[in-house]
Amino acid sequence: MSAPALKITNLNKTYATGTVALKDVSLEIPEGDFFALLGPNGAGKTTIIGITTGLVNKTGGTVEVFGHNIDKETELAKMQIGLVGQEVNFNPFEKTLNIVVNQAGYYGIPRSVAIPRAKKLLTDLGLGEKMDQNAMTLSGGMKRRLMIARALVNEPKFLILDEPTAGVDVELRRGMWEYLTGLSKSGLTILLTTHYLEEAEQLCKHVAIINKGEIVEQGPMEAVIAKHHLPAQAGDAEAVKEGYRGSRLEEVFLKLTSEK
Amino acid sequence: MDTYGKWISFYTMLRKDIVRMFRIWVQTFLPSVITSCLYFLIFGTVLGSRIGTMQGVDYMTFVVPGLVMLAIVINAYSNTSFTFFQSKFFFRGIDEILVSPTPPWLLILGFISGGIVRGVLVGALVLLISVFFTGLQLAIYNILIIFGFALLTSLYFLSRGWSTASMQNQLTASTSCRPSSLPRSSTSAASSTPSTHSPLGRRASLTSTRFSISSTVSATASSASPISRSGYPLRSSQA
């Protein structure tokens, strides 16, 4: 049996300010999974991602990516990962193509390989005509797609998406989800954090809900929903139709995160 | 990542920085050229004609090493401090390297190499201009020593630039490193090795009035010390 894409055991993080961000978090994401990590703002999602990708130091616990411990086999672990961060973090004065090609370079991929790969990714993501333009000329949605292209250029086995669709309009968002679903079907493991819970419900096979640094629930999506979903009430159907009620997952999310 | 992969990563960082400095040449190369021209015109031509000779050479020739050194110091310092500061605090571009398998020591090497290239390039530009102002009378006794000093001076001051950029958390309280995490050697090196050693050595190599071995040794030691320690606060600060 192959190692899980991500295995987190008793992960703790206390920031220098004294803020306890994570308390004994344990998590396992099987290979090929489309996994949703959900939680309110400040729950610890980005801290988990930061520790996994090497952007944040952990206080305790272990993290393994495809069996590679991030402390002992850092390079091997990082080779497996592609990260789409929460915030746009590239130099806006650089050309779109160069941003992707340079990222490949940091993974030791020569330019002769990186350039055609970057061009294909940018074309697939609808940025073919923007390759030679500075990143600052891109719209918000295009910048997000550029970040996805950059994260995929090293052909990772494990893609981490930290709120990739924040501020993206409905049409573009749907296009991005279709693209990512295609990647998931091709075998790529995806960890997603998002505040669009109805989309997480549709896309993801497994879910973990984190609140105040603790995992309050995790498991297969349907099982979690079935376990916590509120019984139907009179008028629910009409309310959902009218847009007064959110998705089933949203109800579970609110129930779990407001209880704490 | 194997050795070849590391080389590609280093090359990518260096190439990116060089492309950047040439793209904004008006900000990177031109100011030093203009400043040096003004120095030559004002201090060299106007004042220099009244001063006469200094240590056996005319005043214009005498100031050349200092101006070359000034250009190297400013450019090496600002390139590293600005690039690192911008990358860590504004665009967060450093994250794209930190998430990659590029080891931290290679990241530091990539940053400092860009500073060396800019320092040496601008120094060479100013030296070329000085040839024009001194009427092709500049005596260069050993180009290798000049290059060596340009390299060492760049290395020393870009290290200082790195330290300065790393300390910016004092200005932006919520981010960056703690001052206590900076290597003590960086501050002790600054106090124990007067930066004037390097210009003196460079002047000696140009005018051949004297050459101080101790300058070279002290400059090398002080240059290397701030960057020799690993564990720079590259990651997220609150980390």
Image: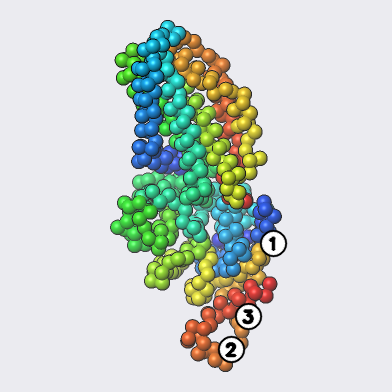
Q: Which of the two discs, 2 and 3, labels the residue nearer the N terminus?
A: 3
Q: Which of B20 and B78 is in front in this view?
A: B78
Q: Measured from the top left, where is residue B66 in percent x and y?
A: 45, 20
Residue assigned mark 2: A232
Please, what secondary structure does the residue beneath circle 2 have? loop
Q: How far is the residue under mark 3 from the one under mark 1?
A: 23 Å
The reply to whether residue A64 is visible in this rendering is no
Say which of A116 and A138 sits in front: A138
Name which residue type carries label 1.
Answer: Asp
> Residue A182 versus residue B51: which sits nearer the camera?
B51
Q: Nearer the viewer, residue B154 or A145?
A: B154
Q: First in sequence, mark 2 or 1: give its number.
A: 1
Tag 3, which secondary structure? Answer: helix
Indicate the quadrant where residue A225 lies: bottom right
Residue B189 lies in what quarter of the image?
top right
Q: Mark 2: few, some, or many residues within 10 Å (few <14, many ≥20)?
A: few
Circle 3/circle 1 CB separation < 8 Å: no
Residue drawn 51% across and 30% down? B157
Q: Do the residues labelled 2 and 3 touch (CB within 8 Å)?
A: no
Q: Name the residue under label 3.
A: A227
> For the residue marked with disc 2, what is the amino acid?
Ala
Residue B124 drawn at (x, y percent): 38, 25
Kind of residue at badge 3: Lys
The answer to which of marks 3 and 1 sits earlier in the sequence is 1
Q: Which residue lies furthest to the top in this view?
A: B56
